[in-house]
Image: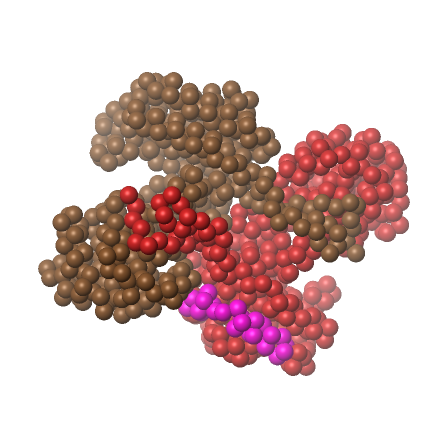
Chain colours: A brown, B red
Amino acid sequence: MKTASKPAADADIQRYMQEVGQRARAAARVMARAETAAKDAALMAMAAEIERQRDALIAANRKDIDAGKAQGLDSAMLDRLELSAARIQSMAEGLRQIAALADPVGEITDLNYRPSGIQVGRMRVPLGVIGIIYESRPNVTADAAGLCLKSGNASILRGGSEAIHSNRAIAACIQTGLKQAGLPEDAVQVVETTDRAAVGELIRMKEYVDVIVPRGGKSLIERISAEATIPIIKHLHGVCHVYIDDKADLDKAVKVAFNAKTQRYGTCNTMETLLVARDVATKVLPVLGRMYQDQGVELRGCEATRKILAGIQAATEEDWHTEYLAPILSIRVVENVDAAMDHIAKYGSAHTDSIVTEDITRARRFLREVDSSSVMVNASTRFADGFEYGLGAEIGISTDKLHARGPVGLEGLTSVKFVVLGDGHIRK
Amino acid sequence: MKTASKPAADADIQRYMQEVGQRARAAARVMARAETAAKDAALMAMAAEIERQRDALIAANRKDIDAGKAQGLDSAMLDRLELSAARIQSMAEGLRQIAALADPVGEITDLNYRPSGIQVGRMRVPLGVIGIIYESRPNVTADAAGLCLKSGNASILRGGSEAIHSNRAIAACIQTGLKQAGLPEDAVQVVETTDRAAVGELIRMKEYVDVIVPRGGKSLIERISAEATIPIIKHLHGVCHVYIDDKADLDKAVKVAFNAKTQRYGTCNTMETLLVARDVATKVLPVLGRMYQDQGVELRGCEATRKILAGIQAATEEDWHTEYLAPILSIRVVENVDAAMDHIAKYGSAHTDSIVTEDITRARRFLREVDSSSVMVNASTRFADGFEYGLGAEIGISTDKLHARGPVGLEGLTSVKFVVLGDGHIRK
């Protein structure tokens, strides 16, 4: 990983970023043909170096924390920024886990003879150069670099300015790992300037960057989506639903609906709206309402809900659209599975939606007709996650429809090309 | 297919397109759950109606041809515009072939139990609403509508203004087919205005359109890419190469290199630059040069080529970048396979490139390292085609890396979502 000298003035940013892009493109060709053993050796060496440099990483992180406090960052932001010994350990473990994953690159599938006599198949290949734009959490530097590297891509990492010292220190460990494995230093580059203009360049350098993966809050994602001319793999927001059908097993319904909301509040796959079939609302809502309120979850309901759960606030039109990321839940009583699917189509964010039912016909319909990246039957929305799905690790969860949808692992960082084998074959 | 009343004035275009978008979105939900039998019935009924309406189609097309002549369209354009009886027949046949293809929608793959006890799999689903923007050839109306329909998508078709009468007449046949099969009329909509502002709307209606497929010349594609805020599946250009290695079987080399250039000149998978290893250049170039010149192909060469083929024009830097789409070929003598791959990486368009060699190590390297949508060994670049690859039909050839790469068939018009089955499972 090369951290080319920091540009002296704003006017140099464009030139600097172009240079970073050219180097990444050159490194990408080497990475695309790198053997799995070399990539794994680099990942293991990075992990070891991160452990060895623990104290140096904590010291570098201290600078960011102190600067953050001086700038008045809030405690949630400072918490995300912090590199504790435990977080450093888990960063190293994460790299080892990536090393242990199967290498997707080069896999040839569907190789068949065609009537003309040629053999046609598909080969999985890296995307090329991936630009990662992220905020605060410095561990993303190692995670993202590791995933891009294993999938045979070169990466350009642009972290938040508040984490620059931490990111540089992690970058030094990554560089050591690449060197030890004989891989090009430019395979992972950390953008050395904290100037925002660098992001503007990165998301428009079509000739050098193949895809942008932004990781952060909704405002960052929206800004980058609006300005980028390069394709983006992005996660926008998660307005996830659980629908309790009148044919549901109510014990399962209570378990799933409680877990989907309360297992963690701040995650994108947390349920934000509970839909309940009218015929079971009076049975299931009093139980669930008490459990949520005991847990400190604020409830907002439609009119029918408020007749059952007296005293809760009325849900507004805006509530149905809202990703709370907090202990707040909106509840709506609906007529049946059709009304539930209509609600999800209108207000959902196509992230993760679950039906609780014992009726196989409704389960089949929900699975096919709900147009979300994850659709579930009798399971908590909290399962929508790369590790839970067996992808091994994820670069994020995509709410886009093209290319990668849902949790994005190594495969989402690759593409597929056609390979054709002949013996002097020509087209008639 | 609904052809909402034509807007009265420019100011109405936005409102009109929004209405088209809303209808398409509603129809897309119905199409996503439509059974294969209904979709196939619609395709067969459309084919029958097109055959039945042959004379009406020819009459409508006559209006476009006459208007085109009056406007001074060139003969190539007029040829593309023409709907002969044979072309109408092949349009109908095309729809029947799409009906005969396997339905990709709903296929569940990789359904496995995870350690938590949930089952996780992937289900192939339609993209939703597809906007097709195309020029002149009216048969695209039927082809594109058929492919979108079979893959469970709603489509919005915007053809060239020069073909508006032909497109409306084909649209009427499509509408008849949809009705007969009981599918929503809005599943295929032809934009009824020839105003360019309609295209500007179409490529920015994010809430109603999921992907844009532009089909036409490079300038159309570039304009749409620059302005669209919706993801695009596009074909930009094809600067395709054949590299004759010094370990090539020279008989195969001559066959493949001649076919790749001369089998058709105007197609994107036609070879535009021939690369020849220095050690065999004096053997192979005189033979090939004579064949090309007998065929009327103009040759442009590097210095070394011109020493072997006396009298041919010098190739300029621009030639290496050029997609001629004409009987012109640039030829370069290179040192070896590495120099050939360097040339392709620098000047190629990542479309289709082929090596001719008997050396398996070089073949393996070329297949892995050349970053093009189709890479070939001992086969003509002209094979890069949906029918030849067994996709059955293609909506186009993508030169993008994300989502669909190379010939795009039904599968490229679909996406994959995760399905999760549990029995009241919750996340610990």
Query: In the rendered image of this protein, does residue A43 appear above or below residue B183?
Result: above
Spot occupied by residue A10 in the image (x, y as percentages of width and height): 42, 30
Spot occupied by residue B365 in the image (x, y as percentages of width and height): 67, 34
Q: Give the image quarter of residue B287.
A: top right
Please report the bounds of the magenta region as a residue range.
Answer: B26-50
Q: How many marks?
A: 0
Spot occupied by residue B374 in the image (x, y as percentages of width and height): 65, 46
Q: Residue at x 71, y 40 (%)?
A: B320
Give the quadrant of the C terminus of chain B: top left
Q: Give the image quarter of residue B60.
A: bottom right
Spot occupied by residue B257 in the image (x, y as percentages of width and height): 79, 45
Query: In the rendered image of this protein, does residue A267 appear above or below residue B79?
Result: above
Q: Give the image quarter of residue A57.
A: top left
Q: Residue at x 58, y 30 (%)?
A: A34
| Residue A206 in view in this figure | no
Comparing B63 with A177, the one in front is A177
Comparing A288 with B61, the one in front is A288
Q: In this view, does B76 lie to the left or right of B179?
A: right
Q: Is residue A158 left or right of residue B356?
A: left
Magenta stretch, main secondary structure, is helix
| Residue B252 in view in this figure | yes
